[in-house]
């Protein structure tokens, strides 16, 4: 309901704006008495568009508003001024519900920029708004907005309005009251068009108003923006608390949740687009918050799960949502880097097939190794082993066996392949060599750093097979035929030799008289035995670092 105009104090009391305070008091008492006698009065100034708008409480409230200087000027401004025969003619047409005739009456009289013409325009603008409450007429909408724009931007109108208003309200019509009203008049007008939007469920009333005035009233804040912002805020909060990489994977449930929350944000923003409020300052703040929430998820996917494609998609949505140029530029810079990383990842992606007959396929990307439905990020790798063994009959090689295992705390990729020396052996040998070579470059450095951190930063003893590694060096139990076993140790401060890999074993050395002597051996199938050359060198370097 168009409450701003329907509940106008002058309308409730059945008076025009020239009425004195004495007239107001007399009329309010008259209406209340008649209402108490179940007699609802009708007056010449009633416009015939509303019913049941006179109640005792409404009459009392109307009188109070007219007795308040700041409220009275608003009631005065948004009601008809009946000053001459033209106004009398239009008001007479109200009685027979000839609103079209009243519109033409004031239209014909409103040509020019004289004071009378300006007040005819104000009456006409008010009438358009009243008629729009009953009829959704886009022509009336545009005409009313054009009139209000001309009036509000006219210094001559405000000078005339102030002069006339002071004639009708000498006691309270101070310069401050008028000045304050001028500051807020567009907000009050915005409330009228928000009410029309609510009556007709038509976004054009707010959108067209915003195109001309770019201002918001209390009603649009409470009834339109507040619900939209609340819905967006709830959705963004859901995005902000998501930790997609926490469990080490990005599953369908998480993807569906993001899609649902983003859809909610976009749905509410689409409403604001229709209303012409998409670029409102507060809306831009909400858009930036939404974009930043998506950015955090995208970077999490990119940095911790290597889901580069999904990160790109979320970044693109975030750019569309962003409200400020500074955030858009930041997001675009990050998107450019993500796209570069995707290109590099595609160019550097290595696919190794270890069997031509539907067997194992291993994919190595910039940050993870994948086989089947298992994926291990290099940074999460904790152990690796690989070795190849020949099988012979009567000392004649007949087949080759390949074993490979890499493991994190939560996942293990492992396979074992047998290959005839006559069928596919060369292909498997080459593929195997590529896999081992890439593992040495991509995976083993992460494992070595993790082991060194445990040994020197956490002061832990790390066991690889039966060999123990500590801050002091590496050691093993040396068994005696009689008596307790002793601990044999190679200190990092000693002359330390780099372990060697050969024929399926890793040999560790100790120094004796300036020469390397075998300390012990481990099978290459022992988890992390193959990283011993790099681990020993890293430990020596770390032990010598002050």
Image (tube, rainbow, N blue to C red):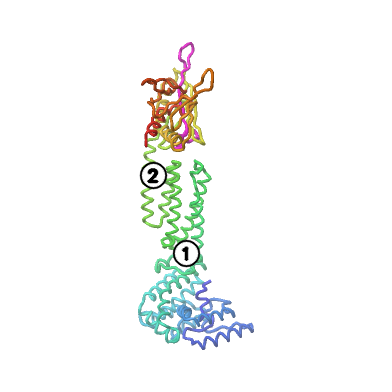
Look at 54% across and 20% down and name the residue there. Answer: 483
Would residue 216 be counted in the magenta stretch?
no
- Mark 2, Cα crowd under 10 Å, few <14 / some 14-19 / many 20+, is many
- Find residue 159 and report its horizontal and vertical position in percent: 37, 81
> In this picture, which residue range is highlighted in magenta?
369-398
User: 299 or 453: which is nearer to us?
Assistant: 453
**Which numbered disc flags the more N-terminal residue, 2 or 1?**
1
- Find residue 54 and report its horizontal and vertical position in percent: 57, 79
Give the dominant element type of the magenta stretch: helix, strand or loop. Answer: strand
Numbered disc 2: secondary structure? helix
Look at 46% across and 58% down and name the residue there. Answer: 269
Left or right of 395 in this view: 61: right
User: 534 or 92: which is nearer to us?
Assistant: 534
Circle 1 is placed at which residue position? 203
Quarter of the image for residue 273 reads: bottom left
Q: Residue pushed farthest right?
A: 37
2 and 1 marks in contact (CB < 8 Å) = no
- Mark 1, Cα crowd under 10 Å, few <14 / some 14-19 / many 20+, is some
Circle 2 is placed at which residue position? 338
- Find residue 330 and report its horizontal and vertical position in percent: 37, 51
Numbered disc 1: secondary structure? loop
For the C terminus, the quadrant is top left
């Amino acid at each position: 309901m168009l409450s701003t105009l329907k509940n106008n104090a002058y309308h409730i009391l059945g008076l025009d704006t020239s009425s004195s305070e004495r007239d107001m008091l007399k009329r309010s008492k008259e209406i209340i008495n008649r209402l108490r006698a179940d007699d609802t009065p009708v007056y010449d100034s009633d416009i015939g568009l509303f019913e049941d708008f006179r109640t005792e409480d409404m009459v009392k409230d109307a009188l109070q508003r007219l007795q308040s200087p700041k409220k009275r000027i608003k009631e005065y401004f948004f009601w008809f001024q009946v000053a001459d025969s033209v106004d009398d003619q239009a008001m007479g047409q109200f009685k027979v519900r000839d609103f079209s005739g009243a519109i033409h009456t004031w239209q014909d009289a409103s040509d020019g920029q004289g004071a009378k013409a300006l007040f005819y325009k104000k009456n006409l603008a008010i009438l358009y708004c009243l008629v729009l409450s009953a009829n959704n007429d886009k022509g009336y909408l545009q005409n009313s907005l054009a009139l209000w724009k001309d009036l509000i931007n006219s210094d001559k109108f405000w000078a005339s309005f102030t002069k006339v208003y002071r004639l009708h309200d000498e006691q309270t019509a101070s310069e401050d009251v008028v000045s304050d009203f001028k500051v807020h008049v567009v907000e009050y007008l915005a409330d009228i068009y928000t009410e029309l939007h609510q009556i007709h469920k038509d976004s054009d009333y707010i959108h067209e108003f915003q195109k001309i005035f770019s201002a918001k009233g209390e009603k649009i804040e409470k009834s339109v923006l507040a619900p939209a912002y609340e819905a967006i805020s709830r959705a963004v909060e859901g995005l902000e608390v998501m930790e997609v990489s926490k469990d080490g994977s990005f599953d369908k449930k998480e993807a569906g949740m993001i899609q649902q929350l983003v859809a909610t944000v976009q749905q509410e923003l689409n409403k604001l687009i229709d209303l012409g409020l998409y670029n409102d300052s507060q809306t831009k703040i909400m858009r930036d918050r939404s974009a930043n929430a998506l950015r955090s998820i995208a970077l999490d996917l990119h940095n911790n799960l290597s889901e580069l494609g999904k990160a790109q998609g979320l970044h693109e949505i975030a750019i569309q949502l962003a409200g400020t140029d500074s955030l858009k530029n930041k997001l675009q810079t990050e998107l450019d880097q993500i796209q570069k990383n995707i290109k590099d990842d595609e160019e550097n992606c290595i696919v190794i097939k270890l069997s031509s007959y539907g067997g194992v396929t291993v994919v190595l990307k910039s940050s993870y190794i994948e086989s089947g439905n298992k994926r291990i990020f290099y940074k999460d790798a904790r152990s690796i082993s690989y070795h190849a063994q020949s099988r012979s009959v009567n000392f004649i090689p007949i087949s080759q066996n390949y074993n490979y295992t890499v493991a994190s705390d939560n996942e293990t990729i492992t396979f074992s392949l047998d290959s005839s020396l006559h069928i596919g052996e060369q292909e498997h040998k080459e593929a195997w060599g590529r896999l081992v070579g890439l593992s040495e470059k991509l995976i083993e450095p992460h494992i070595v750093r993790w082991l060194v951190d445990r040994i020197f930063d956490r002061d832990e003893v790390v066991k690889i097979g039966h060999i123990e590694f500590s801050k002091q060096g590496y050691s093993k139990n040396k068994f005696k035929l009689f008596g307790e076993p002793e601990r044999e140790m190679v200190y990092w401060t000693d002359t330390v030799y780099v372990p060697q890999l050969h024929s399926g074993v890793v040999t560790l050395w100790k120094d004796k008289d300036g020469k390397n002597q075998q300390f012990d051996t481990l099978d290459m199938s022992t988890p992390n035995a193959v990283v011993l050359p790099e681990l020993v060198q890293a430990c020596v370097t770390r032990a010598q670092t002050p």
